[in-house]
Image (spheres, rainbow, N blue to C red):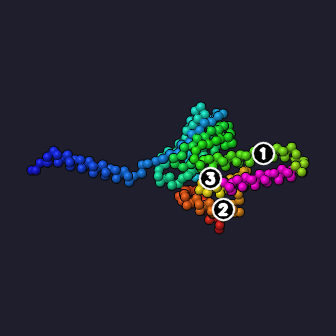
């Protein structure tokens, strides 16, 4: 029987270890273990609540991602474990809820780190945000809507004080219509200047009570253009799949 000398055995063992290493490497490269997360941090004043909740929003439902404690007005929420395949469905809308009627909606993508500040007693009207472009656009939409609402409420106060003066009422109506036009122009400009952001969908469908700023059927070419541009960037996004169905329904 031929014996293997020690030097040859070492060479064979080294070769086997090298082969084993690359086989394991190949095995793991075929599996997707890499994940990403989105971080939402905040600092609240006048906060009496002890919990805050993060939901991911879809066109026809919402999914609770996590709940966190609010400690000394501070909180951290994270959407963890977003796989590479799932990342194709982003950017995604999120709702951050202090209470049932006190929440904000923002827009985020894997890897985003977003920081909020605000008064917990009226968060949507007071919050500020630091982070990527999408959540900043969502804040801008909320902020401008707040200015519109404040202006309308001021007009309402004047109307109540001069309800029997036809001339004042005419001026109020004229001013109100101008406010509507101004806000509509703001929304249209935001859509035009940020055509690759899903925040434009929120801009297009933004409402105040029963007031619709951009009528869907009157602006169908714009909506189709928005879909074409966004779909080129995010073809697997659930919001665009829904929008495609909506466009088909309107066109019938």
Residue 92, how many percent across, how many down? Answer: 56, 51
Nearer-the-camera pick, 205 or 175: 175
Magenta range: 169-190
**Which residue, given by chain and number where applicable, does mark 1 sit on?**
153
Disc 1 or disc 3, which is closer to the eye?
A: 3
Q: Which label is found at residue 222?
A: 2
| Left or right of residue 232, residue 22 in this image | left
Residue 6, how many percent across, how many down? Answer: 15, 44
Considering the numbered disc 2 on the image, is that residue within a helix, a strand or a loop? helix
Seen at 74% across and 48% down, the residue is: 148
Residue 137 visible somewhere in the drawing: yes
Of the image marks 1 and 3, the number of the one nearer the N terminus: 1
Quadrant including the C terminus: bottom right
Q: Which label is found at residue 199?
A: 3
Considering the numbered disc 3 on the image, is that residue within a helix, a strand or a loop? helix
Residue 17, how many percent across, how many down? Answer: 26, 47
Residue 143, how many percent across, how many down? Answer: 68, 46
């Amino acid at each position: 029987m031929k014996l293997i000398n020690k030097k040859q055995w070492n060479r064979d063992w080294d070769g086997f270890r090298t082969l084993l290493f690359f086989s394991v490497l190949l095995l793991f490269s075929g599996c997707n273990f890499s994940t990403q997360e989105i971080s939402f941090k905040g600092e609240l004043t006048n906060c009496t609540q002890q919990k805050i909740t993060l939901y991911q929003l879809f066109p026809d439902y919402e999914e609770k991602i996590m709940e966190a404690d609010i400690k000394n007005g501070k909180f951290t929420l994270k959407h963890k474990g977003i796989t590479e395949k799932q990342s194709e469905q982003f950017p995604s809308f999120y709702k951050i809820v202090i209470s049932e009627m006190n929440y904000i909606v923002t827009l985020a993508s894997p890897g985003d780190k977003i920081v909020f500040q605000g008064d917990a007693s009226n968060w949507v009207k007071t919050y500020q945000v630091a982070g990527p472009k999408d959540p900043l656009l969502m804040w801008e939409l909320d902020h401008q809507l707040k200015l519109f609402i404040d202006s309308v409420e001021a007009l309402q106060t004047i109307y109540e004080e001069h309800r029997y003066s036809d001339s004042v009422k005419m001026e109020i109506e004229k001013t109100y219509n101008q406010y509507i036009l101004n806000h509509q122009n703001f929304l249209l400009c935001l859509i035009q200047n940020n055509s690759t952001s899903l925040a434009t969908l929120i801009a297009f469908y933004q409402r105040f009570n029963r007031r619709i700023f951009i009528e869907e059927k009157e602006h169908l070419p714009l909506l189709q253009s928005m879909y074409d541009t966004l779909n080129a960037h995010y073809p697997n996004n659930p919001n665009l799949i829904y929008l495609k169905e909506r466009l088909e329904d309107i066109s019938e």
